[in-house]
Image (spheres, rainbow, N blue to C red):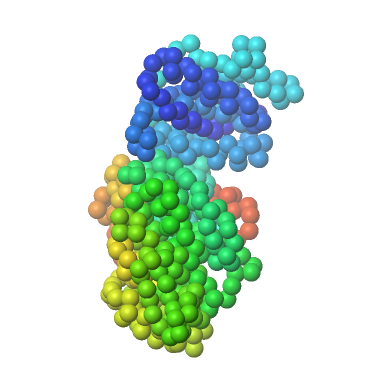
Amino acid sequence: MIWHYFPIGMRFPVSDFSEETKRACWKTAFSAVFASDATQTGLYEACESYDPITQSPVYICIVCYVGIKQSRAAGETLHALDALMTRLCLYKPLVQANDLESFGPYPILGEIDANGTIRPNEAGAPFIPTETPVPMQVSKGFRILIAPDSMKDVCDAERLSRVIGTAAADCGLRVQRMPVADGGEGTVRALVAGTNGRYDTVTCEDLNGDRVKMTVGVIPGPVAVIEAADAVGFSRRAAHTPPIERRSSFGVGMLIRKTLDLGYRRIWIGLGGSLTVDLGLGALHALGVRFTDADGEEISPCPETLSAIGKIDRTGLDPRIAQTELTILNDVTAPLLGQDGALNVFGPQKGAEPAQIDAWEHEFARLASVIGGDPHAPGSGAAGGLGFALASIGGRLAKGSDAVLDRIGIGPAIREADFVITGEGSFDKQSIHYEKAPAAVLERLSDADRPGCLFVGRQGIDSSALLREYPKLKGVAVCPIGDEPFDETIRAAFAKSVLPMIGKDVANIG
C-alpha cells in the first residue's frame, strides 16, 4: 500500500498566542479533520501569523492527511486543500512511503481500522498535542516556481499550477505555486491567493438579466477586486447568451455598485474576458448615468441602441464614485478607435459582423466626443470600450499584468527560485504585444537572471523567435489539452518536456 501526504491548513483569529489559545485552536482543527470522510491519518505543524485584512493575529494549524493512492476521488479532494500551505511558502513535496513508520518521529493522530473507519487517539476523542507544535521548516532542495495563467475553457490557473506542482514534487523538487493573471479571468483568485486575502459574495445581473452570485476579492488595503468576466464575460457564457448587438455591460456597473455597498472605496476592476462591445455605457447606466433619445425617452444602452442616444446626463451618477479610487486593470493596450481599437480587433472574436463594426465604430467616435476623454489612450478599448467609460468617471487605467504581478510579489519569488514555469492556454503574438501575464513573467526572468520555460496548450509563435525575445527562456512545453483526464496529460508533458530542460540547462537532473 502506498500513502501520500495532502496538507490542509486552518486559520484562527486570536487575541493572543498563549498555550491555552493554541490548544483550543488545535482541538477545533483536529475535530474538523476527523469529521471528514476521507481515509486519513497524519502529522501536524503550526505557524503564528498576522492577517493583513483584519489587522489581527491569527494562529494557523496545518494538518497533513495521508490518503491511499488508489483512492483517486479522495486524492483529488485533498489535493485541492493545499492553497494555504502554498501561500505561506511551506509547501513540502508529496511524500511516498510503504508504511507509516517511514514518516519519521511525528505523532499519529489516529488509526484506520479494518473497515476503513478513522479511530482518533484517546478512545475516540480528538487528539490534542501535549506540546504546541513549532513552525515547520521550509524544505531544502531545487526550487521550482510555478506561475501560470489559465488555460481558457480547460482549467484555471490554480488547478494548472497545482497539477504541474504535484508532478514536480513527485520528482523531489521543492515547489512554490503562484498563479498569475493580467486583468482577465482569474485575476480575483490570483490576487486573493497571492496576498492571503479573502472573498465576499454579492448578487448582480448577468448578460441575460438573471440575478446570480458574483465574487468580490478582498486584498490588503483593503482593496476590493472584481472582474468584468464574472459579470458579462466568458465566466458567464451560456447557451442562451443574447446576440452581440443586445449585450450590455450593465452587470459590471451593478457589480461595482454592490461592492460600494460593502463599504469599499478602493476597487480594482479586471476588464479581460468580457463579451460586450457597448462602449461601457451599460455599466455607466447601472451607476446612475441616464441616456435619452431626441424626444427625451430613456434608453438602455447596448450596441443596437447606440445610434439613438442623443443626450447623456451624469447628474445621477452614484456620488460614492467621486470618493472611490477606481483602478482599471486592462489586459490589452488597445485604444478605443481605429484599426487597432476595440471593435476592429476584438469585435470579430465576440461575434460582430463587418457591417456592425463599421456602424458601431462611427457611434463610438460620436459618443466619445460627448463623454470626453482620450479615445486613443492605451487600454481605453479594453472590454469593448469599458476602459474608456470607467476612465471617464475617474478610473485610472493600469496594465493588468504589472499590477497583479507586483502585488503578489512575483519579483522576489523569481529571485528565490532556481527555475520558473509559466504559461497559458495559447501563447501567440498578441500575448507578447499586449504583455499578457506569462509574457510579463518571462520579462522578469531576465531582470532576476533566472531560467524558465513556457508551458502552453497551443504555441502560436515560432520557438526560435521566442528564444530571441526572451534570453532566459530555455524552451517551450506544448501540451494540447482537450477532454478529461487532462491532469495526466499535463503530468506527462511535464515529465517529457520540462524535466529535460531542467536537467540539461540548469541542474543536470531529470
Q: Which quadrant, please, contains the C terminus?
A: top left
Q: Residue pushed farthest right?
A: 115
Whether residue 398 sits left or right of residue 430 in the image: it is: left
Residue at 44 percent of width and 42 percent of height: 198
Q: Nearer the viewer, residue 78 or 394?
A: 394
Q: Residue pushed farthest left?
A: 447
Residue at 40 percent of width and 28 percent of height: 58
Image coordinates of residue 392 in percent, x first then y, are: 32, 69
Above or below 16: residue 372: below
Image coordinates of residue 387 in percent, x first then y, are: 36, 68
Q: Nearer the viewer, residue 384 or 74?
A: 384
Above or below 126: residue 237: below
Residue at 33 percent of width and 51 percent of height: 266
Above or below 359: residue 418: above
Q: Which quadrant, please, contains the N terminus?
A: top right
Residue at 38 percent of width and 66 percent of height: 316
**Is residue 150 among what the camera can see?**
yes
Image coordinates of residue 472 in percent, x first then y, are: 31, 56
Image coordinates of residue 230 in percent, x first then y, are: 50, 58
Q: Total number of numbered labels? A: 0
**Is residue 437 among what the camera can see?**
no
> Residue 271 sits in which quadrant?
bottom left
